[in-house]
Image (tube, rainbow, N blue to C red):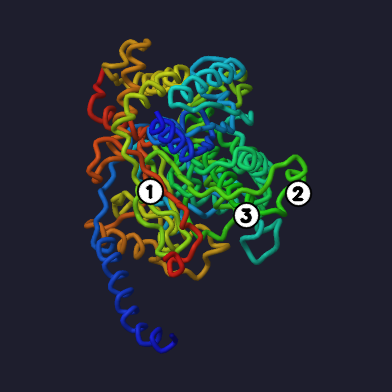
Amino acid sequence: MRNQHQRSMPKRRVYHCCLLLLAAAPLAAQKLPLGANPEGKRLLIIQSHHDDHTWEFGFGGFIARLTRSGYEAWYVRTTNDEKDSGIGWGRGDQINHKESVEATRHLGIKEVISLNWRNDHMDSVPMNEVRAHYILLIRKLRPDVLMTWNPWGHYDRNPDHRKVARAAGEAAWMAGLANVHPEHLAAGLKPHRVPYVYYSQRSDYGRGQVPNIAIELSAEDVRRKEAAFHAHQNVRRGSPKDAMDKASRETGEQHGVRYAEVFYFRDEWSHLPGLAPLLEESVVKR
Amino acid sequence: MRLLILLILTLAAQARTVLVVTADASDFLLAAGGTIASMTARGDTAILLRVTNDEKNSWDLSPDETARRNGLECAEAAKLLGIGKVVSLGYREGELGGVSPTELRDRIMFYIRLHKPDVLFLPNPHAEYVEVLDRHYAGLAAEEASHTAALRNHQPPFAQVGLETHVTRELYYYAQPFDPRRREPESTATFVPQPKVSDIGAMLDRKIRAALALKTINHAVAMRIRDRLESTGRRLPLLDTVNDASVAKLTEINVRTLAGTGAKGTGFQSAEEFHYAGPDFGVPSKFRK
């Protein structure tokens, strides 16, 4: 039995390698569609930490592109980032917050809203509590576009990313139902579903996020993204000066443009798979 | 006459018990209604276990009134699919994230041991981009319950009231087609449910009739679409007037389009897609023969 198994191993390996190559080839060659700016004026970015949006897998360049086109943008920093530095909790939190404000300024973001949940402890925070915060903010700010972590990302070891992703993903649609937190209506807020949602996630994490859209960036968008990245000196000191330029250029090359970022995009009718074709074909302007 | 009696006895012997777990009133129907209807049409007995109370899914009704109407309409829809009994667990819609997963699992397990289903339909908790997380939580609990229902050391008090262990032989994981990778085999491992398509051509009209019974939810869907379009200076001619006829038409289009999506590439006209774990599930392939 063992000999038979051993004999078959090289053949099996070749077979599996071929399968892997066949599976990977279309992915490597596939260019994603280039996304246009969605219709709207208001952008909400919900992230776990001060710097999530500025990584190479983050939204930095796209945020710069939207604010350049006239969008107003708000940044929700869900945790207090107390663990993300080597200088102690309290001081690290203060510096991270200050640098977050500086980074978001480079991207044209209007305000940083800190919810200050405890950094890296969000696994033990009830999902519905976090979601309630987001629903209130969505109803207050009425964004056309939401950017957040992908609730279906795999292998993310950060508990804050996972919790924020799920809570924000649900808040985006639940904020549109009047019977969800009806107390908000008593305060004058109205239901509001976020029509366009972009998810980010490291796309090199196993079977995790497979992006479905590429966003072309201008050189100016990338310059601002680079500036935002380096504004987080508390955690990025010593990073290559062109880190974001290089990452955006590599992504751009894969998708036939100079600079790009890639995301998973949910359109305004993605939640209605049985009606999306009708709506895409038959909706007309008033 | 003898032949007829023999036929009836044979059919009765083959009739199965089907337990359908759903997070809400519409999900099981839109994702699996045709397949369930075809099972009840051949003589299977079906029971619906509805986990939440659907209190939030209306356009302009209070939570109490929404829950009341959706409960009645869900029962009517289930009846039209041939489901003989509906059990509501009564959790608040949208709040399953705050419910103890073990409590939910054990309540579903109770019904598995009580009804001893041959077939279990459950929301696929592994399907991606299903934004209603109640479906994820209900699916996880049902999946786990199908496992623990077979293990004697889970909930020993159940045995005190005569609820013995039970193995469910067939599992249909269902989800509406949100997941772009839903047809990819998940793995070559033995213990992974695989994609399965069910032809619902003969049951499509019945499924549409059942979907039409969900009047409160259908009306809310239509109003939300119209509201979104109006707020962005657009219109859908079908919804210029939202009334029973236009809502019914929208609902019918929804069901027909979903059936067409399920059938794409299969050779069927109308179908539903599942991940399926049959009687062989759990038996390593080398031992199956």
Residue under label 3, please give it: A81
Task: Judge left or right: residue A5 versus residue B119.
Answer: left
The answer to whether marks 2 and 3 sit on the same chain is no
Quadrant where the C terminus of chain A is found in the figure: top left
Q: Which secondary structure lies at badge 3?
A: loop
Other residues around mark 2 within 10 Å, as few (<14) / some (14–19) / many (≥20): few
- Residue at the location (27% across, 32% down)? A277
Q: Which amino acid does label 2 sit on?
A: Pro
For residue A259, above or below residue B41:
below
Q: Do the residues labelled 1 and 3 touch (CB within 8 Å)?
A: no
Amino acid beneath label 3:
Asp
Residue B288 image offset from top left, x and y in percent: 44, 64
Q: Where is residue B66 in the image (x, y as percent from the top left)?
A: 56, 18
Q: Which of B174 and B137 is in front in this view?
A: B174
Q: Quadrant of residue A206?
A: bottom left
Q: Mark 3 lies on which chain?
A: A
Residue occupied by mark 1:
A264
